[in-house]
Amino acid sequence: MIQLEQVNYSYQKTTVLNQVTLHESEPIISAIWGRNGAGKTTLMSILAGHNRPDSGTVQIMGQDPYNNLAAQEHLCYIQENHPLGKNWTVTDMVQMGPYFHPQWNQDLAERLIDMFELPAKKKIIKFSKGMKTATQIILGLASNAKVTILDEPTNGLDAEKRKFFYNALLESYEDNPRLILISSHHIEEIQPLCESLIVLQAGEVLLNQPMEEMREKGVLLTGGIEDVSRVTADVKVIESSQMGSTVKVMIDEPYSKMWKDIAHAQGLSIEKATLQDYLVNRTRKQEGVKP
Amino acid sequence: MKSTLDESQPIFHQIATMIMDDIVEGRLKVEEQVPSTNELSRFYNINPATARKGLQELVDKGIVYKQRGVGMFVAKGAREALLIERKQDFYEEYIEPLLEEARRIHMNEDMIIDLIRGKKDKESEL
């Protein structure tokens, strides 16, 4: 469905994407995570054909998306601050939808407008942040596009509205399985929805793995400094902090029975790190922290 | 079924465990239909593939069986098989940690057995 081969992109002599290769042939929901400046938005805009890579190839449903209407039919890229017509109301947007997206789902669009309680006659430009985000979500989901890209789709939404979105996303995905890429800082919230996780670091794809595996990563061990050092001698320690003679480390290992047994046998306390904390530590610049 | 998932285990495993709990406790009976992939996905806001993996674990164990186009159902003998399995796990999962804590706070086995049987006044024990 999407295929990027060795894509490079620079902006004013700064490398933004470096040899990015990414293949996705299945209609799955996938999360994109990266620190600020890791290249998420650039990657998405290249996928959507808004930007052209300096070198490398991009294919969406077998076609180069850049300046290509045939590829755009399969694409819906919802930017963080999506440009919508200045004088548009949601009613206008819903009427224009099928024009841009041949697979447009009118029924879903109308139901979501009701659910998010968006006023039909007010101009979108006058909407609050949360209402704008809801409008963008409606456009993204109702597009039914084969490749749907949502950049920070929950910005400004309260907890209830985020839940609406997660439900609508899953429902719409079940009705029409397609590739949905979601970038979000709320990784803990969206991780159960996603089948895989793409991690970007400094313009490169650091990881692209099944979410089930990723959410097992990151083990926190706490105990006496000597015990912890001995147990972690052969593994990668990605965070370490000390309080008196007690040390707490995060290791780049799965939260497995093996580690629980080891911790147990050595009298260390063991916990699963959150995915967010794990990713933050995993993408830290200097590697090889020692306890 | 519990209402939320936690971080302790893979999600698909939690899904499988919850359905097994329902079978063991008799909330799901033999030949009764178990929740579908989509129902689980909606209810817990999880990816359908994850829900499917949880159900597949039960199919692989022979706890539920698939009826094409209809759904999944609790297999004959599922409850008995699960009871045997759980009894086997009982020592490791419950007795071992209990004994460990008992050692830590200087309780011997007799004291534990008395506690279980409710023989002694718990207040005076402390």
Image (cartoon, rainbow, N blue to C red):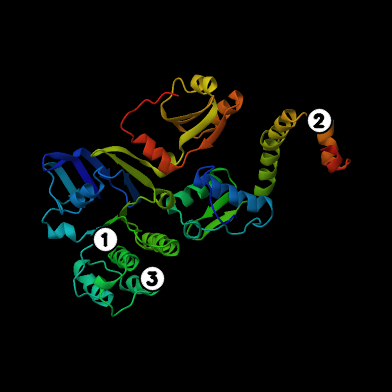
Residue B120 horizontal side relative to residue A129, left or right: right
Tell me where residue A151 appears, x and y as whole percent: 28, 55
Residue B37 horizontal side relative to residue A35, left or right: right
Q: Are marks 1 and 2 on the same chain?
A: no
Q: Which mark is residue A145?
A: 1
Tell me: residue B95, above or below residue A193: above
Residue A20 horizontal side relative to residue A193, left or right: left
Identify residue type, mark 1: Ala
Tell me where residue A56 appears, x and y as whole percent: 14, 40
Callout 3 touching callout 2 (CB < 8 Å):
no
Q: Are marks 3 and 2 on the same chain?
A: no
Nearest to viewer (mark 1 / mark 3):
3
For disc 3, the chain is A
Nearest to viewer (mark 1 / mark 2):
2
Callout 1 touching callout 3 (CB < 8 Å):
no
Q: Name the residue tied to disc 3.
A: A116
Q: Name the residue tied to disc 2.
A: B109
Please give the count of numbered marks on the rendered protein: 3
Asked if residue A115 can be seen in this view, the reply is: yes
Residue A242 horizontal side relative to residue A11, left or right: right
Q: Are marks 1 and 3 on the same chain?
A: yes
- Determine which quarter of the picture holds residue A208: top left
The residue depicted at 58 percent of the width and 45 percent of the height is B62
Between the residue at mark 1 and the residue at mark 3, the CA separation in whole angstroms equals 21 Å
Q: Residues within 10 Å of mark 3 (few under 14, many from 20)?
A: some
Tell me: residue A256, above or below residue A158: above
Identify residue type, mark 2: Glu
Along the viewing direction, whichever of A106 and A226 lies nearer the viewer = A226
Between the residue at mark 3 and the residue at mark 2, the CA separation in whole angstroms equals 60 Å
For disc 1, the chain is A
Tell me: residue B88, above or below residue A164: above
Mark 1 / mark 3, whichever is N-terminal: 3
